[in-house]
Image (spheres, rainbow, N blue to C red):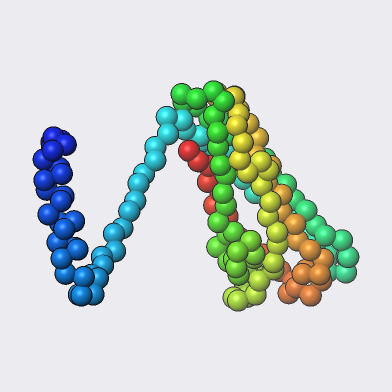
Amino acid sequence: MILPRTTILIILLPFFFLGWIDCSQAANTVSLGVSVTVTSKNQCKFNTKNAALAFGDIDTFDSVDVQATASLRFICIGKDNPATFLITQDDGLYESGLNAPNMIHTVQAGVFLPYELSLSPLSGSVPKNAEQTLTVTGTVRSANYRSAMIGDYSDTVTISIFP
């Protein structure tokens, strides 16, 4: 219920003046948590359910960086045209820090192979109802694999699209 303006002033003024009456006491504070969920009338979703970055066989005697790419298809539907999207990824299950994904040796526990991951585009505006392509590129640097333990390595990365 919305109170009339004069009623609000009558209620607020006594608290205002009480604060001025006793200034000798220390201030008492309270923390207030604030949150909001912003919803969108648009929705973007991946049409590709699973994909793989297959680096293939890497020879430890090579001195070139090895790259692999995968293409994911997505579409944005809803009210707005064009629709705006944002894509994020979690750096995989074995990340050692921000933007530092690692593959883990599939047999030898605790043995990792660093790699780099890039997504393009990360955000943008696209026509609604028009399928788009996200390109995922992975790179294993020669400096990292030249001293790597021989064997198979793997990781799982979760890629999300908003809204």
The image position of residue 162, as x and y in percent, is 50, 41
Residue at 61% from the left image edge and 40% from the top image edge: 123
Q: Which of 141 and 152 lies nearest the eye of the viewer?
A: 141
Is any part of residue 103 visible from this angle?
no
Q: Residue shown at 46%/24% (left/top)?
A: 79
- Residue 143 relative to residue 69: left or right: right
Q: Is residue 83 above or below residue 51?
A: above
Q: Which residue occupies the extreme front position in the image? A: 21
Residue 2's x, y, as percent? 15, 35
- Residue at horizontal 55%, vertical 56%? 90
Q: Quadrant of residue 144?
A: bottom right
Instruction: Tell whether 36 sits left or right of 116.
Output: left
In this picture, is 162 found above or below 103?
A: above
Position of residue 27 measured from the top left corner of the image (x, y, whole percent): 24, 71
Residue 139, visible in the rendered structure: yes
Viewer-proximal residue among 143 and 49: 143
Residue 111: x and y in percent read 65, 75
Q: Quadrant of residue 40?
A: top left
Residue 66 is drawn in which quadrant? bottom right
- Residue 95 drawn above or below residue 8: below
Residue drawn at 63 percent across, 44 percent down? 122
